[in-house]
Amino acid sequence: MPALIGMTIAGFSGYASLITVAPLWVVEGGAGEAGAGLVNGVLLGFTVLTQLFVPGLVRRFGWGTTMSAGMLLMGVPSLLHLFSDGLEFTLALSALRGVGFGILTVTGSAAVAELVDPARRGAAIGAYGLAVAMPNLVILPLSPFVATTVGYWPVFLIGAGPLIGIPFAIRLGRVLHGPMSSEPDAEATHSSSAAPTMTLTTAYRRLLRPMALLLGVTLSGGAIITFAPQLVDKPWASTLALFGMGLTGALSRWRMGALADKYGADRFLPPLVILTVISMALAAWTISGDGASTLSLVAFVLASLLLGVSYGGLQNLTLVVAFEVVPRKHIGTASAVWNLGFDLGTATGSVLVGLIAAGWGFPQALLVCAVLAASTLPLAWRRHSAMAQGGTR
């Protein structure tokens, strides 16, 4: 776990440093809102495509080699940003970073399931989630501030941080042997609904629910993370909003794991989905009028704080649910599908909000995010209602 935590912090430091700055970088080069949205859209599009192949890469090349390659592909392109702020060049670097990020996300979350007993999986996911959230808490909100006040070069240096994670990846690879959860399912009894003979098709079908719930909240989170510096015209407000979202997201993702171990994950899903809808509606309202007023800026920060609670909490809980509904032999599949939902949602939020904002404005774009999050509420209630009527986990 220490090696996993070290690799995760290094890798996500590179991700967090550029997720808001890379779109700003192409705006400096003359791109508009749609072009800025494409930067993270390409990053996470390639992330999603890569995630589907990560279990096969691990089978062929091993854990250590695969994870080290991911760190390399995330770190080196960050330094190459110094050579050009052109949109096409930046999109090419985003594609390379996306491949590396896809490797990091799938191997990281799958390693949690490989290293920890299922009875403590929620708490372990919480610890892993805290390592993911720490760079988002510190580096993500400070990066646009540093870029606009000091310069872009310090941010691009920090973005090369995944290179520091290579020794951790090698060390972790010495512990994890063989393919990603292809061994016989000795722990199938951890979930009453996960039979060891489950087919891959059935596993994918069961994973659609947690993936859709995750997609709903990450779409909103991706919108705020990508466009916060453009939603409000005061740097201190966007910095506070991103810091607040990172803080509440980190705490929620950490603590929800222990609550899921004790009470079950499903009962917390509906209120967190509702909180996502409320926070996005509030954010849209704050920027629909005089976005420069102190009241509007404070309300935007509050909306970001609320979104962080659901953003972090649903990340933890949906991963717990994903690991619960499949047997151990499909853990690699569950990790890939969960990460696909996370990054597809973030990418969609970036591209969709950019396109809608270019035509109708940011308030309307954020309201669309709220509506899409609300559409996942029936999925959150479905199993929760069955449990309330006497069902078991």
Image (spheres, grey):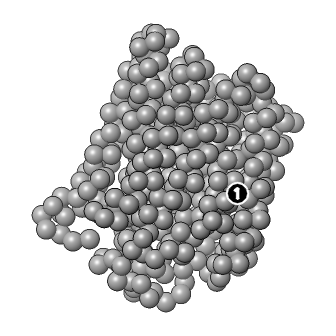
Q: Which residue is more in the foreground, 83 or 166?
A: 166
Task: Tell which residue pokes out farthest to the front in this image.
Answer: 2
Can residue 328 be seen in the rendering of this structure?
yes
The amino acid pointed to by label 1 is Gly
In the rendered view, does 170 fall on the left or right side of 125? Answer: right
Image quadrant occupied by the N terminus: bottom right
Dot 1 crowding, Cα within 10 Å, few <14, some 14–19, many 20+: many
- Secondary structure found at label 1: helix
- Residue sitting at x 41%, y 37%: 307
In the rendered view, does 60 fall on the left or right side of 258? Answer: right
- Residue sitting at x 13%, y 68%: 390
Q: Which residue is mark 1?
A: 100
Image coords of residue 39 (percent x, y): 66, 39
- Residue sitting at x 38%, y 55%: 256
- Residue sitting at x 36%, y 71%: 325
Looking at the image, residue 71 lies above or below residue 280:
below
